[in-house]
Image: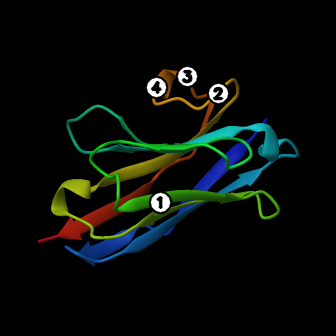
Amino acid sequence: QVQLVESGGGLVQAGGSLRLSCAASGRTFSTYHMGWFRQAPGQEREFVAAISWNGGTTTYADSVKGRFTISRDSAKKTVYLQMNSLKPEDTAVYYCAAKWLGVSMVPSSYVYWGQGTQVTVSS
């Protein structure tokens, strides 16, 4: 069992930066692949970034490639999403999630989810 708690969201102007954190509880955090997803009002949840259990593999949605960076600190049981050059279209609730068996961009393949943190980018 893993519990995930996101933090770091807020209001930022376009072009600004935020760093989201996802703190995990449970002894097996280091065995999970982790992902970040986001959901804007009236839209489906979409993939943002994912990282493998050992940090050796990362993957990004085309819309955030070059602007966002996912990383993890297994000693702190925390996954981060550094978001730079933010755009108004990045506005959404951001969720972290955990899974086994490979990095994935598919939300339904993730087993555990956090409650989400709101990111609002003003123009």
SS assignment at label 3: helix
Q: Nearer the viewer, mark 3 or mark 2?
A: 2
Q: Amino acid at mark 3?
A: Ser
Q: Amino acid at mark 4?
A: Val
Left or right for 48, reference 20? left
**Label 4: which residue?**
106
Left or right for 77, reference 11? right
Residue at 52% of width from left, 47% of height from top?
115
**Label 2: which residue?**
102
**Sooner in the amino-acid sequence: mark 1 or mark 3:** 1
Colour scheme of this structure image? rainbow
Q: Position of residue 15 (x, y in %)?
A: 22, 75
The disc at residue 98 is none
**Label 3: which residue?**
109
Tell me if label 4 and label 3 are in contact, CB under 8 Å: yes
Question: Separation of disc 1 and disc 4 at Cα?
Answer: 19 Å
Residue at 59% of width from left, 32% of height from top?
103
Q: Position of residue 28 (x, y in %)?
A: 85, 41
- Check the picture and name the quadrant holding the C terminus: bottom left
Q: Quadrant of residue 10?
A: bottom left
Compared to residue 99, the image places residue 108 above or below, namely: above
**Label 1: which residue?**
69
Tell me if label 1 and label 4 are in contact, CB under 8 Å: no
Question: Separation of disc 3 and disc 2 at Cα?
Answer: 10 Å
Q: Amino acid at mark 2?
A: Gly
